[in-house]
Image (spheres, grey):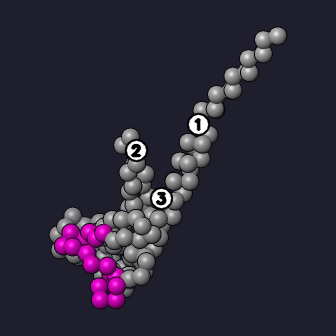
Amino acid sequence: MTPDPTQPWGVAIDYAGRAALTEDGHTVELRLYDSTLGGPLVPDPMTGEYPAVYVSAQVAESGEGGAQLRGHGLALVQPAGGRPAVPDPAAVVRAVTAALADFETRRASFAALCAAWAPAPPAPEPEPEPAP
């Protein structure tokens, strides 16, 4: 993934911290959030630090019979020095890369499982003996 240099997070996000992008032929859903309840961003009274920002990515592909295969990725952006976390396009890249790798791992595992459970081909019927 190549981050968009015109966007602080490297991708255009909506007001709710969501974005979608296409990578390696997959649509990747992104979500940026922190651990607050949506109020003003203030330091934690116990630690004095602002909350970390979570960047989650998910790939989901649907198949036959309602099957769905997913891949998930997560990256954290930690605050530092008593200041809020700053946008980090590399965190988006890490989350997308992790989601695609997880999807591929699950796809390979599912393919191996399907191959192991595939029924054996039926045995060929014996040739009838020719009449004398």
Can residue 42 be seen here? The reply is yes
Specify the quadrant of the image occupied by residue 64: top left
Residue wearing tag 2: 64
Among numbered discs 3 and 2, the one appearing first in the sequence = 2
Q: Position of residue 13 (x, y in %)?
A: 25, 75
Q: Which mark is residue 118?
A: 1
Q: Position of residue 15 (x, y in %)?
A: 18, 73
Among numbered discs 2 and 1, the one appearing first in the sequence = 2
Identify which residue is drawn at 60% across, 32% down. Answer: 119
Q: Bounds of the magenta span?
A: 4-20
Q: Which element is circle 2 on? A: helix
How many discs appear?
A: 3
Q: Residues within 10 Å of mark 1 (few under 14, many from 20)?
A: few
Residue wearing tag 3: 103
Among numbered discs 3 and 1, the one appearing first in the sequence = 3
Q: Are marks 2 and 1 in contact (CB under 8 Å)?
A: no
Identify the main secondary structure in magenta.
loop
Q: Which element is circle 1 on? A: loop
Residues at marks 2 and 1, CA–CA distance in whole angstroms? 16 Å
Amino acid found under the numbered disc labelled 1: Ala
Quadrant assignment for the C terminus: top right
Identify which residue is drawn at 68% across, 26% down. Answer: 123
Amino acid found under the numbered disc labelled 2: Glu
Q: Which mark is residue 13?
A: none
Quadrant assignment for the N terminus: bottom left
